[in-house]
């Protein structure tokens, strides 16, 4: 594999600007030092989807095809990273180091899978990539858009300035934000900014994003700007709600898809915090083990694991007041990734009537990042999940998880998840 060079400074974040958020049970004011001997984020050769693709390119096993014009390497890059184009979401706030090129007239396209995100800016010099290393967290790269005989992924560690902050739980991670955008796409931070995950009501989501899909009579901040500087929190919501086509809002010629799918947005919002929780617990445990302080750190780590388990089980998900409907094929292709049990059930199956998923346990349990947590932490997660699913833990925090949900999730995981402790299989 060729050496992945370091690039110049990023200006703003890949998937959102710096956001503050109160995170229960995790001291997010503490930024975990990436240079700690147990971590060595900056020194360690990454093992993530982009790094693996770079190795395959070096060996001549694959190549990136180039389409002249707007698309360039993008379609081939997504194909080689196993990222579906129907995951496209469009953000028009200036929350990228390529901010001058982004606006409501020219939104940035973002595509994602469980372990990698790709950003494309119209007229930009590079494609932006964020890939999940199973142990190290999110690693950032760019790929030049101009055709070359040897495409090179440039690692961009300086992105940690915006991507290792309170909203990412103090580890290299991602977040999705909702703002009050000015007419040119500049987010008005003085008016407020929300870090979004599945606990946030729909009414507060998607400020600064184009959204194609429907939420019934439930409003949201998508597809709208705040035109009056004297009233920065008052969005012009005319022709912004329940849009199944974005034709009235933006010219999407040259984009891979004509949608910014509402269901894809909801999945990404869940996934970003889930990823950050996995990496945070992993980093803290590795450091405690390295420093010989696991015993004295157990109570604090258990608090963080409790937070992770509650999030995995959607214990505090904000219920949907009315059904949500997407407009792209994402609602069909995402569940097809499986895995499925003998009854055909999958943790990726959508509900979208009263909640996002039919079975309340995060599909991120199948990821390399979950399996990459230190054994001590992963085993405690398994035990705490098992206690809830078998009704040994009936605390108020999990009261919304019905007996049927607990049984269904337990059965699905038993049949589809490798590496389970023996007591799960009884």
Image: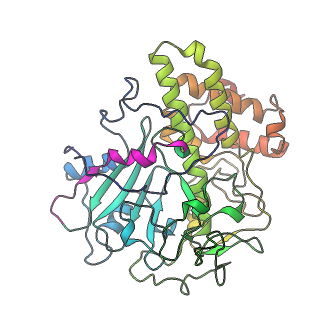
Left or right of 112 on screen, residue 385: right
Give residue 341's position: percent from left, percent from top: 65, 47
Is residue 324 covered in magenta? Answer: no
At a point 76% along the width and 74% down the height, the residue shown is 216
> Foreground: 343 or 170?
170
Residue 55, compared with residue 424, is above or below; it is below
> Foreground: 172 or 129?
172
**Residue 121 in view (yes/no):** no
Magenta region, residue range: 148-166
At a point 56% along the width and 66% down the height, the residue shown is 330
Q: Quadrant of the C terminus?
A: top right
Give residue 28's position: percent from left, percent from top: 57, 36
Rendered image quadrant of residue 146 = bottom left
Left or right of 180 on screen, residue 68: left
**Residue 394 in view (yes/no):** yes
Residue 206, compared with residue 129, is above or below; it is below
Q: Quadrant of the N terminus?
A: top left
């Amino acid at each position: 594999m060729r050496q992945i060079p370091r690039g110049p400074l990023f200006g703003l974040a890949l998937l959102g600007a710096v956001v503050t958020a109160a995170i229960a049970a995790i001291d997010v004011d503490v930024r975990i030092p990436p240079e700690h001997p147990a971590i060595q984020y900056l020194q360690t050769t990454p093992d993530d989807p982009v790094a693996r693709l770079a190795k395959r390119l070096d060996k001549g096993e694959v190549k990136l095809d180039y389409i002249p014009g707007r698309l360039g390497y993008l379609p081939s890059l997504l194909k080689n990273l196993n990222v579906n184009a129907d995951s496209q979401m469009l953000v028009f706030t200036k929350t990228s180091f390529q901010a001058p090129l982004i606006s409501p007239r020219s939104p940035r396209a973002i595509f994602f899978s469980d372990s990698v995100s790709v950003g494309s800016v119209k007229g930009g010099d590079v494609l932006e990539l964020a890939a999940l290393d199973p142990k190290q967290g999110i690693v950032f790269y760019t790929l030049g858009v101009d055709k070359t005989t040897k495409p090179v992924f440039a690692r961009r560690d300086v992105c940690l300035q915006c991507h290792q902050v309170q909203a990412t739980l103090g580890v290299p991670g991602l977040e999705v934000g909702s703002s009050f955008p000015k007419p040119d796409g500049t987010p008005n931070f003085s008016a407020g900014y929300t870090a979004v995950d599945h606990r946030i009501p729909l009414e507060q989501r998607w400020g600064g994003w184009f959204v194609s899909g429907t939420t019934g009579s439930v409003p949201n901040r998508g597809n709208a700007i705040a035109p009056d500087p004297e009233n920065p929190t008052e969005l012009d919501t005319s022709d912004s709600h329940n849009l199944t086509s974005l034709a009235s809002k933006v010219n999407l010629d040259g984009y891979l898809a004509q949608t910014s799918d509402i269901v894809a947005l909801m999945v990404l919002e869940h996934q970003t915090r889930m990823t950050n929780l996995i990496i945070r617990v992993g980093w803290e445990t590795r450091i405690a083990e390295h420093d010989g302080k696991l015993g004295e750190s157990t109570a604090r780590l258990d608090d963080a694991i409790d937070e992770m388990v509650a999030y995995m089980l959607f214990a505090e998900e904000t219920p949907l007041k009315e059904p949500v409907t997407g407009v792209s094929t994402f609602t069909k292709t995402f569940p097809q990734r499986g895995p499925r049990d003998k009854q055909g059930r999958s943790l990726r199956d959508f509900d979208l009537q009263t909640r996002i998923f039919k079975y309340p346990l995060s599909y991120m349990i199948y990821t390399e990042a979950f399996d990459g947590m230190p054994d001590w932490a992963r085993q405690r997660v398994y035990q705490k999940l098992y206690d809830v699913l078998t009704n040994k833990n009936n605390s108020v925090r999990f009261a919304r998880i019905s007996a049927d949900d607990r049984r269904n999730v337990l059965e699905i995981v038993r049949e589809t998840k490798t590496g389970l402790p023996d007591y799960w299989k009884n």
